[in-house]
Amino acid sequence: MKRIKLHLWLFPLIIAMATACNSDGEYVQRGNTICHSYWTFSFGTMYDTLPEVDVATFKSLENWLGHDNRHAYFKAKLVPGVDVLTMKADKYPLFRDKNDYYYMSVPLHVTHVDAFVVLKRNEDDIWAMDNRYAYYDSLRIDSVDIKTFKVKTWNTAVDSKRVYRYGKVLPLADPETYVEDWKGMYSRDKAHIWYLGELLEDVDYETFTVDGNDAHDKNGHFYRGERVTEQQWKEIEAREKN
């Protein structure tokens, strides 16, 4: 009973700490400058000064995005080239002006801002496309067949010819048959198997399977993409149970 009461007492504190840790902070004026303020577990409240900021004209659009009459800021980082008169916040960490979209502080160089659409979000990560290119976070994918491009999982997309893992082409992968396990660790197509995007060569394709944390074929087990002996596997199992 005491253990349950302790957990219930700690729960609101844990939620509050997690919320503070994940917060995007806020803009505050300190003396004659503007700072982006945020909280950390190790050092408490931190204040990052905005470079070259004009205090009198500074405006906060979101707690992670602001501008003065000349400069745009993502948190405390100056973002050059932004038209501050037309900049607007999308959902964190994406924003735009009349000419382009920006992921954090990086311009995406989209071909047409009105054709830009976000296909999938996962925390800070995005898959997006316009009428010519696809995008993963700040990476523009120039090789894409935009007419057949689609997102499969939180880290994988395909078109008619290629598989894209975290926005980069996965060599040899067949887009029609490519699948991942639910953790996104092991993946396979009709002829190959990968671990975190690295091709497994010492593997029997026909008998390879993933069962929870156990990846194995008829010849034995794999741990983090490497073949291990039966004794090594027993030691790994024992260690992970403790």
Image: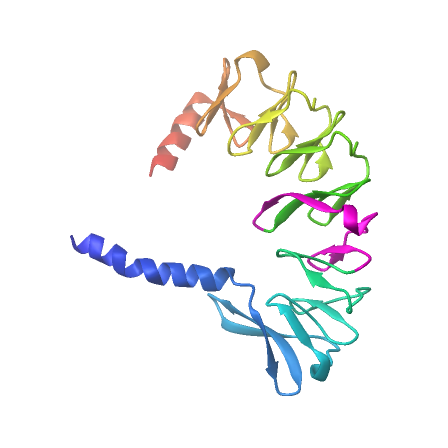
Which residue sits furthest bottom? 31
Task: Residue at 62%, 65% (x, y): give it.
Answer: 64
Q: Depth check: 130 or 219 in front?
A: 130
Looking at the picture, how far across and down is residue 205, in whole percent? 59, 15
Residue 33 at x, y percent in the picture: 66, 83
Q: Is residue 90 left or right of residue 211?
A: right
Highlighted magenta segment, given as a residue range: 98-123
Q: Report x, y in % for residue 15.
A: 39, 59
Viewed as shown, does residue 53 lie left or right of 217?
Answer: right
The image quadrant where one finds the C terminus is: top left
Residue in the image at 75% along x and 78% along y: 52
Q: Is residue 119 magenta?
A: yes
Magenta stretch holds residue 142? no
Task: Please tell me which residue is depicted at 41% across the width and 32% down the height of the picture.
Answer: 236
Q: What residue do we see at 72% from left, 50% from top?
A: 138
Image side of residue 203 versus residue 15, left or right: right
Q: Is residue 59 above or below residue 168?
A: below
Q: Position of residue 216 (x, y in %)?
A: 49, 20
In the picture, residue 47 is in which quadrant? bottom right
Above or below residue 187? Residue 191 is above
Residue 50 sits above or below residue 174 on the image: below
